[in-house]
Image (spheres, coloured by chain):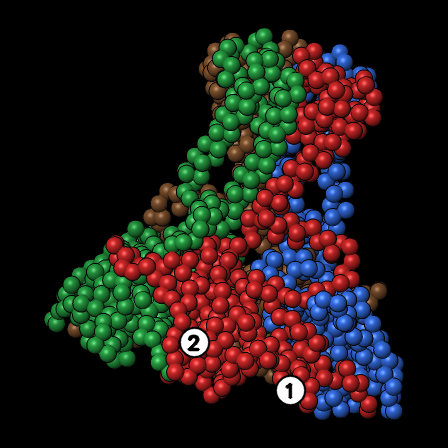
Chain colours: A blue, B brown, C green, D red
């Protein structure tokens, strides 16, 4: 049998990847994961409906944007129905003597507001079949929209909003007579996350049969998980002889475009749901021969143990004899 | 003890099935799973309430249908209450001089709209005990329906809408010196699915003690799972000597009505829920000696890796010496 | 050390129970689990709030009851506020000439309806500070109640309504040269449950140091789980020499008050949630030397495989030489 | 390489902690977990938005507080819009002759109520562009707030409200010829929790290289889990030779500030969700040589087994020869 060159290496390499596929391994020179955990790849051809994916968008947009969007929808719908009432002609709305609005479009607009929001003062009221029919439609649209808005609002609320904060830099520094790769995380929210587990993978370009291919290595952790996570957690990969980082310098990492992919899983107590967080450190986000500054506030007056989340990113440079600095 | 023939084989065969039962294994000549993952079987006698299963239906119908259904419900309820007001007699509604609607039923209908949607302009208003009592009922129905509609709307939103796209055809083709059964999947939505796992089972008719019975075989996969799924995933079953496909031709698969049952599980990040997807490939949906066309767009100008989802189904025919084509 | 008699045996026996505690094991002569899966025990002293547990009740009551409850709440609230308006005195409501309601309480009641449901025709309207203040309160109560009703309605909808139907009787009958304990289940709803697993435990009274104590035995199953559950599933415990049922007669089961506790778990696809169902068969719900009647409709005209759920409970008596009937 | 003293011990000790970090292990003299399961630590510097964490607060506040908060929001919003209408000048609202309210601010306030709650009697109505524009804004705010309130209400309802009751004291007492550490739990709600599992950890200060450090020890349990939890469960750690409690007296526990950390997990049937509960017993919450009073009501007239939850905390002192009392 004659096997095609493209097909063969794909699957073989895949056994060592995370689902990015072999083309990523070969071609992309970019980082695989962005700091915020999103993938640095894209899919085209998903079609209009999937591309728009309105629900996904509505779920994940900022609250400010969500509020603006609903306000816009509200005003837009009113403008639309105002136009419809306008098209019914001048006699289609009965107006109380005191209303004080002369502009016919504004009249129609405010009548639409009274109707869409189901207020119905009666100071403006529909006259004739056309206007009353539009009222029937608008009231349905109003009710459906209120239901829709409530649903979307709750859909936003019901999603776990876990936010794990990663230290801006990871360090590679002396540790217990060895060297270790370390980074630090904390919970940016007040909720409790428990049963945390971490996976760290090193992706770098290696020579495979004379070609530069990206390979993936799982890094063993000193503690792959913690039961509780009330404060902060420093995740440590000791660089012993079995580590793929053993003997590498900062320059080696740069030359092989090394990237550390992080996957954190835990159980969010408020939402009673399993949550996943991703991030990554590129070679240039590693600080050599530094350590994380103590994150605790001590002593505290009342003996209560507290950390200062703002210190999460602070580093202190270590003085060493043998230095392979960044 | 004397055991009955029907009973005995059932259980023995079941140890090798997936929950379809031995009768399926023996009798049904149809495919077990449809392409969309639904089961090709049915249950009767579920009773009216279960048969109607309105909630299930409302949850899974299309958005267009859902919108039409609620609109119909809205209009229908208004017609119902309009009729009730009509039956109260001509004096039961007070009408403002300017309303411009002469038809009494239409008057009743528009009054019902004003009431059900809780607008209440007051240009039509209830007169007397009967009409006011009906208003009391209608306002309750209105509020309950709005609550119901909102609930159903949200129930639809809160369900994971994961949609895994399967390649139209699976292939059996040379692969690393062996042959392999392969198909390709991608995520048809913009959300991320992680921790994907695949199970592939071969169902085919075999001679068991002189009877043609359907048997199930689990196929070993090169990679049973991927951590991330940002692009596409080609699932590969290498046909080595331990494979139940070893040595079989396209004609053999046709003769035994071979069907490949697929079960994909993963974790939907947007909904923070585990999701399941099923599909199947029947013998006639296998293409022999073909490979999947490269799904990536290369090179991309900005170095960003992209796939074109529309290429998911594309195949390229391979030229081989020993051919056992479809 | 001198250990107290009550304390000691409790813990020792517990190692063999399911969480019922040793007193259940010793004292209760009743069945442990009812057919519908509820526990045949109760807890007192939970306190008023826990005892009432209104949310739990609202979630699990029938739809008819739920509808009646909300209607009652609606009418009751209106009666309450009608009384409040009544207490404001005769001049507190302005009534349009055409309203046609003379009874002052009815006027107040209908005004309350207009207000609580936020209709506000204006044909009855509040006069003075007292009435307007009550309107302010009632409108808040109205909005809060609508929100509450919508929430409760959705809370009902969002609960998995999985309903597994158990055959009315289990059978103990010849099976593959052995005897087996068997019962049959099907899904009473149209949704799909997958990854089903079954646990079956035998509870019976045994002589332990001269005392009759209830002991629990896990029964091994021919198939502890099925991947799919589109039709029905017959759960089979073969009574081989390792079975605690080996050599027992119907009379033995009656004498030891044998009870078979069933726990079924699965994944409900519609709700994307894990679901649990319990049931039990008491010794008197076992039929000896019978088999389940074929549940399938064959042949079907279109080759589609169907089962008739109404046949789930049907049994056929077997003729045997050595009979140990019920 | 020269390693810094602070960094080194941190990680080494962490391998033996639960995620509290080594500083907790060294410095904090306080209990780690409060009785209600909250952590006895705090994080500062989370920033305003995270600190306020309004959603978390709204989800977990008492129902009384939640109701008060929404009422306040309702009144506050009406006051706000009343002020806005007031600022539009005296002619901006048309008032029906019968309204009976002279105070202009009150007029504005009640008009706001009619509008925000979408009642719209029409007895007060907006005049001119300014007032009508504010009506447009207020109606949007009203609709959005109703949607928000409904969402928050449901978010509160949809959270599992599991409440496991822990006995006020744990006991260390003779047990089967050994001694055992025991505590008792029951479900304080009427819902069923199943598949319960317990983890118990002992935290105490120990001499490590001449320093007093807090160390964590997992205690083996007689039964780490129960399938059902209809009544109560006594969790027992037998103090055999392998136990870190072996040979310790009450004074030893006090001197080492011993704390028993408890983590209970289970599956809440009503919510179909996994739930976690934490608690802890400090050395001074241990009663030596006592046993838990029988929690069952016996005999019951109808043979139904019942426990009295109020007896959960009751202890009976044991008489022993060798006594190491508290």
Relative horizontal placement of residue B229, taking residue B6 as reference (left or right):
right
Spatial CA distance of label 1 from label 2 is: 28 Å
Q: Numbered disc 1: what chain?
A: D
The foreground one among A172 and A131 is A172
Circle 2 packing at 10 Å, graded few (<14), some (14-19), many (20+), is: many
The foreground one among D268 and D300 is D300
The foreground one among C168 and A228 is A228
Helix, strand or loop at label 1? It is strand
Q: x%, y% of residue A280? A: 75, 71
Vertical position of residue C149 compared to residue C216: above or below: above
Residue under numbered circle 1: D207
Vertical position of residue B160 compared to residue B113: above or below: below
Number of numbered tags placed on the structure image: 2
Spot the residue most to the left: C321
* Residue at image location 43% in from the left, 49% down from the top: C51
Inspect this view and state whether residue B8 appears.
Answer: no
Q: x%, y% of residue D56? A: 66, 53
Residue under numbered circle 2: D289
Same chain, labels 1 and 2: yes
Helix, strand or loop at label 2? It is loop
Relative horizontal placement of residue B76, taking residue C170 as reference (left or right):
right
Q: Which mark is residue B305?
A: none
Say which quarter of the image contains residue D1: bottom right
* Residue at image location 70% in from the left, 48% down from the top: A58
* Residue at image location 54% in from the left, 64% down from the top: D277
Relative horizontal placement of residue C97, taking residue C79 as reference (left or right):
right
The foreground one among B294 and B200 is B200
Inspect this view and state whether residue B223 appears.
Answer: yes
Q: x%, y% of residue A104? A: 79, 19
Q: Which badge, 1 or 2, comes first in the chain's sequence?
A: 1
Circle 1 packing at 10 Å, graded few (<14), some (14-19), many (20+), is: few
């Amino acid at each position: 049998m004659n096997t095609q060159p493209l097909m063969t290496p794909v699957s073989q390499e895949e056994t060592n990847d995370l689902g990015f596929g072999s083309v990523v391994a070969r071609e992309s020179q970019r980082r695989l994961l962005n700091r915020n955990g999103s993938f640095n790849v894209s899919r085209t051809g998903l079609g209009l409906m999937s591309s728009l994916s309105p629900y996904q968008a509505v779920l994940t947009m900022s609250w400010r944007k969500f509020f603006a969007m609903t306000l816009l929808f509200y005003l837009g719908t009113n403008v639309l129905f105002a136009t419809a009432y306008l098209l019914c002609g001048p006699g289609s709305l009965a107006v109380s003597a005191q209303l004080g609005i002369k502009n016919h479009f504004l009249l129609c607009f405010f009548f639409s507001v009274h109707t869409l929001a189901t207020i119905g003062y009666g100071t403006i009221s529909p006259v004739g079949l056309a206007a009353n029919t539009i009222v029937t439609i608008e009231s349905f649209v109003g009710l459906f929209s209120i239901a829709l808005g409530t649903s979307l609002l709750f859909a936003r609320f019901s999603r776990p909003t876990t936010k794990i904060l990663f230290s801006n830099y990871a360090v590679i520094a002396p540790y217990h007579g060895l060297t270790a790769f370390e980074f630090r995380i904390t919970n940016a929210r007040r909720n409790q996350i428990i049963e945390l587990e971490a996976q760290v993978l090193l992706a770098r370009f290696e020579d495979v049969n004379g070609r530069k291919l990206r390979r993936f290595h799982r890094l063993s952790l000193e503690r792959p998980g913690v039961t509780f996570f009330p404060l902060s957690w420093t995740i440590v990969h000791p660089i012993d002889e079995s580590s793929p980082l053993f003997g590498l310098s900062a320059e080696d990492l740069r030359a092989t475009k090394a990237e550390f992919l992080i996957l954190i899983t835990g159980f969010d107590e408020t939402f009673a749901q399993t949550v996943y967080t991703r991030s990554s450190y590129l070679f240039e986000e590693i600080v050599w021969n530094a350590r994380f500054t103590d994150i605790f506030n001590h002593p505290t007056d009342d003996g209560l143990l507290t950390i200062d989340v703002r210190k999460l990113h602070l580093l202190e440079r270590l003085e060493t004899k043998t230095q392979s600095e960044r």
